[in-house]
Image: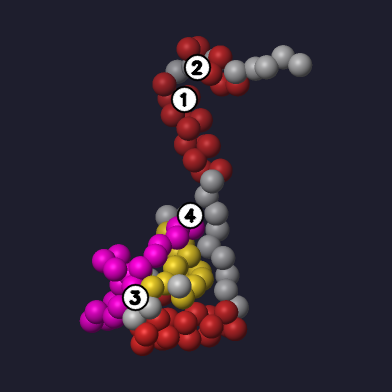
Protein backbone atom coordinates (compact mmCIF):
# COMPACT_ATOMS: atom_id res chain seq x y z
CA UNK A 1 0.00 0.00 0.00
CA UNK A 2 1.29 3.43 -0.91
CA UNK A 3 1.68 5.83 1.99
CA UNK A 4 0.20 9.16 0.93
CA UNK A 5 1.00 12.52 2.48
CA UNK A 6 -2.62 13.68 2.24
CA UNK A 7 -3.13 17.40 1.77
CA UNK A 8 0.55 18.17 2.41
CA UNK A 9 1.30 17.01 -1.12
CA UNK A 10 -1.14 19.53 -2.61
CA UNK A 11 -0.57 22.60 -0.41
CA UNK A 12 1.96 24.13 -2.77
CA UNK A 13 -0.70 24.08 -5.51
CA UNK A 14 -3.49 25.49 -3.32
CA UNK A 15 -4.44 29.10 -2.93
CA UNK A 16 -4.16 30.60 0.55
CA UNK A 17 -7.95 30.94 0.70
CA UNK A 18 -8.36 27.23 0.03
CA UNK A 19 -5.93 26.26 2.79
CA UNK A 20 -7.73 28.57 5.24
CA UNK A 21 -11.11 27.12 4.27
CA UNK A 22 -9.80 23.56 4.75
CA UNK A 23 -8.44 24.46 8.18
CA UNK A 24 -11.80 26.03 9.10
CA UNK A 25 -13.65 22.89 7.94
CA UNK A 26 -11.36 20.64 10.02
CA UNK A 27 -12.00 22.82 13.08
CA UNK A 28 -15.76 22.82 12.47
CA UNK A 29 -15.73 19.01 12.40
CA UNK A 30 -14.72 19.11 16.09
CA UNK A 31 -17.79 21.17 17.04
CA UNK A 32 -20.49 19.46 19.08
CA UNK A 33 -24.05 20.36 19.92
CA UNK A 34 -24.92 21.23 23.50
CA UNK A 35 -26.22 18.11 25.29
CA UNK A 36 -29.82 18.24 26.47
CA UNK A 37 -30.11 17.33 30.16
CA UNK A 38 -33.19 15.72 31.65
CA UNK A 39 -34.96 16.97 34.79
CA UNK A 40 -33.45 14.32 37.05
CA UNK A 41 -29.89 15.21 35.98
CA UNK A 42 -30.59 18.92 36.53
CA UNK A 43 -31.83 18.22 40.07
CA UNK A 44 -28.67 16.20 40.76
CA UNK A 45 -26.51 19.08 39.50
CA UNK A 46 -28.43 21.51 41.73
CA UNK A 47 -27.86 19.27 44.76
CA UNK A 48 -24.14 18.87 43.97
CA UNK A 49 -23.70 22.62 43.50
CA UNK A 50 -25.33 23.29 46.85
CA UNK A 51 -23.13 20.71 48.58
CA UNK A 52 -19.97 22.04 46.94
CA UNK A 53 -20.74 25.61 48.06
CA UNK A 54 -21.69 24.47 51.57
CA UNK A 55 -18.58 22.30 52.03
CA UNK A 56 -16.22 24.58 50.06
CA UNK A 57 -15.01 21.42 48.34
CA UNK A 58 -12.92 21.15 45.20
CA UNK A 59 -15.01 20.14 42.23
CA UNK A 60 -14.52 19.16 38.62
CA UNK A 61 -16.96 20.72 36.16
CA UNK A 62 -17.72 19.55 32.64
CA UNK A 63 -18.69 22.79 30.90
CA UNK A 64 -20.06 23.56 27.42
CA UNK A 65 -18.48 26.64 25.88
CA UNK A 66 -17.78 27.76 22.31
CA UNK A 67 -19.24 24.56 20.81
CA UNK A 68 -16.78 22.41 22.81
CA UNK A 69 -16.75 20.59 26.16
CA UNK A 70 -14.18 21.81 28.69
CA UNK A 71 -13.14 20.44 32.08
CA UNK A 72 -12.39 22.86 34.88
CA UNK A 73 -11.30 22.14 38.44
CA UNK A 74 -11.40 24.34 41.52
CA UNK A 75 -13.58 25.69 44.33
CA UNK A 76 -17.03 27.05 43.58
CA UNK A 77 -18.25 30.31 45.07
CA UNK A 78 -21.23 32.64 44.80
CA UNK A 79 -20.40 36.32 44.32
CA UNK A 80 -23.30 38.69 43.86
CA UNK A 81 -25.54 37.08 41.28
CA UNK A 82 -22.77 35.00 39.65
CA UNK A 83 -21.34 31.53 40.05
CA UNK A 84 -17.54 31.37 39.97
CA UNK A 85 -15.08 28.50 39.78
CA UNK A 86 -11.95 30.09 41.24
CA UNK A 87 -11.89 33.22 39.04
CA UNK A 88 -13.84 31.91 36.02
CA UNK A 89 -17.49 32.93 35.80
CA UNK A 90 -19.79 30.03 34.91
CA UNK A 91 -23.26 30.08 33.44
CA UNK A 92 -25.43 27.52 35.18
CA UNK A 93 -27.17 26.51 31.93
CA UNK A 94 -23.81 25.48 30.41
CA UNK A 95 -22.79 23.11 33.23
CA UNK A 96 -23.05 19.53 31.98
CA UNK A 97 -21.70 17.57 34.94
CA UNK A 98 -20.18 18.12 38.39
CA UNK A 99 -17.94 15.82 40.38
CA UNK A 100 -16.99 16.61 43.99
CA UNK A 101 -13.35 15.71 44.55
What separation in Å lies between label 1 and label 2 (alpha carbons)? 7 Å
If you read the primary sequence from the N terminus, does the residue marked by circle 4 or circle 1 appear first? Answer: 1
Residue occupying image coordinates x 40% and y 62%: 72
Residue behind mark 3? 76
Residue occupying image coordinates x 45% and y 64%: 63
Q: Is 43 covered by the magenta stretch?
A: no
Residue behind mark 1? 19
Residue behind mark 4? 68
Q: Position of residue 54 (x, y in %)?
A: 36, 87
Q: Which element type, helix, strand or loop, lies under badge 2?
A: helix
If you read the primary sequence from the N terminus, does the residue marked by circle 2 or circle 3 appear first? Answer: 2
What separation in Å lies between label 1 and label 3 (alpha carbons)? 42 Å
Check disc 3: other Cα within 10 Å, few if <14, some if 14-19, many if 20+.
Answer: many
Q: Nearer the viewer, residue 35 or 98?
A: 98
Indicate whether 38 appears above or below 70.
Answer: below
Q: Is residue 45 visible?
A: yes
What separation in Å lies between label 2 and label 3 (alpha carbons)? 47 Å
Which one is closest to the eye, mark 4 or mark 1? 4
Q: Is residue 94 visible?
A: no
If you read the primary sequence from the N terminus, does the residue marked by circle 1 or circle 3 appear first? Answer: 1
The disc at residue 84 is none
Q: Position of residue 28 (x, y in %)?
A: 51, 43
Amino acid sequence: MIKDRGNIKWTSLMLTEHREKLKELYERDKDIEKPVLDEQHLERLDFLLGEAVRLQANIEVLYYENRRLHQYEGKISLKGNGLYLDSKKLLIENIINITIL
